[in-house]
Amino acid sequence: MSNFPFLSVLTVAPLVGALVVVLLPRSRPVLAKQVALGWSLLVLALSVAMWVTFQVDGDRFQFRESYPWIPNWGVNFTFAADGIALVMLMLIAILVPLVILASWHDAETSKRSVPVYFALLLVLETTMIGVFAAADIFLFYVFFEVMLVPMYFLIGSYGGHQRQYAAVKFFLYSLVGGLFMLAAVIGLWVVGGKTFDWVALSQVDITTGTERWLFLGFFVAFAIKAPFFPFHTWLPDAGGAAPAGAAALLVGVLDKVGTFGILRYCLPLFPEAAKWFAPYALALGVIGIIYAALLAVGQNDLKRLVSYTSIAHFGFIGVGIFAFTTQAGTGAVLYMLNHGLATGLLFLVVGMLVARRGSALISDFGGAGKLVPVLAGVLFFAGLASLALPGTAPFVSEFLVLIGTFTVNKPVAVIATLGIILAAAYVLWMVQRTTQGTLNPALTEIEGMRKDLNLREKVVVAPLIVLIIVLGFYPKPVTDVINPAVQATMTDIGRTDPAPTVGGVQEASR
């Protein structure tokens, strides 16, 4: 199956499914949901087949396809995937059907078209797959920008309080970042011999000043998308207003486009500029970890709290990327996957809790675990995974980031470790105020709060719980896929891991 056009089929399939769903009559909402779910499961099956076909010891980029698009500009529909992209494609394939199941009644409560809602989720899946599969920089830019459209409508049309404000803020921030990238893309095309092919551009020798400006153009766009401090302010509003399913994809996948872009484009294409900017990026990562964690502690809105936790987690990913060690880099990519699983689960469970209560305010809960013990238990587990408890998948990635950073930059690693303490504070306090303690009498009067997880909701959370536990104890199948791509990226920027030490003396010098 190595010759099967996996990436083009995976990119187009959800779009075809979206067209089918949107053409269904509004009077058949259940059929629209079933078709959307079935189509997303087809994408999952194809993604699993692609994962099995991928050769860990093979070429860096596999499943390469290229079709002419705009020959005069040197633009092609070129797709290829390395281990980093493959992991993110699998994350998309896993999350989307679970989000569709979790969002089964979201569109109905908004009193808007159900088929359109699920069609937007499938369109979003197409753009997410395309942005990770693209090996042509112009094609990547197109998917990067088009991805804003379905998410804008999911937030603006189907979101909660202040949805229009949040949607516009999300769109404008991302659009500004896209303008910086567009300028850099054009500049790269000019200095790179009028081609957008990633492989060709990675061989181009660029002068120091030009390289730094081009790096900054891409980095600003990716820092906004990630989001890194101080470009983060759009996420709490968007995450707080978006439907729970859309928010899970927003923080679970869309934000990873920023960190993926840094790994795929900023580091290999502009290696000297990346090394020049690394100390500043590490500083932004550390500030983001502490600052966002402190803000999360003070939140009274559950969805905004989860959004701030994501900003802190992206600080860890940024530190892992710019530490420039294979261990930290592998940890950063693994963190991208594990954060998507853990925070995706946390957002979905919070969405279930908010839907039952009719409020996202923590102060409106209290002792909810006495009424919905299973839901409270899943929330507790998701919170523990989010704070990287040993035995859960995020712990492995966070440990790799910190230990890989410590070998080259001890102060950054030590300061970043403080984020773990703050994570325990905001997660455990959130759990205590919502599901533990004295039961809020108002909850007993709400019908939804007397209903624990139903079968559909258990099917949503069970796969994520299993994956978080399995990868927490045995991450090797994923790290084996990630490692070659991370090592190749370190080679691109001319960095090698420090020699191991014995008794404080480097082995290389003994």
Image (tube, helix red, strand yellow):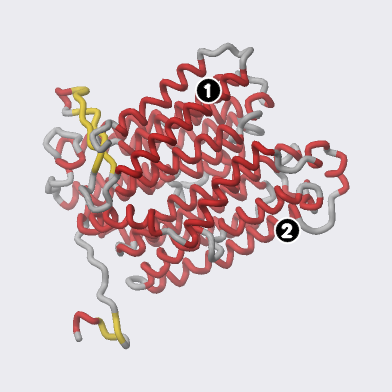
Q: Residue at x 30, y 85 (%)?
A: 502
| Image coords of residue 235 (percent x, y) | 53, 43
**Foreground of the two, 186 or 471:** 471
Whether 350 is drawn above or below 331: the answer is above
Q: Are marks 1 and 2 in contact (CB under 8 Å)?
A: no
Q: Residues within 10 Å of mark 2 (few under 14, many from 20)?
A: some
Quarter of the rendering containing residue 182: top left
Query: In which image quadrant can residue 331 be found?
Result: bottom left
- How far apart marks 1 and 2 lie (CA) works out to 39 Å
Residue 348 drawn above or below residue 156: below
Residue 461, image quadrant: top right
Q: Circle 1 sits on which residue?
A: 35
**Left or right: 66 with respect to 451?**
left
- Dot 1 or dot 2, earlier in sequence: 1
The x and y percentages for residue 90 are 41, 42
Image quadrant holding the C terminus, namely: bottom left
Judge whether 40 appears above or below 406 on screen: above
Horizontal arrangement in the rendering, residue 157 relative to residue 124 (left or right): right
Q: Residue furthest front?
A: 1
Q: Which mark is residue 432?
A: 2
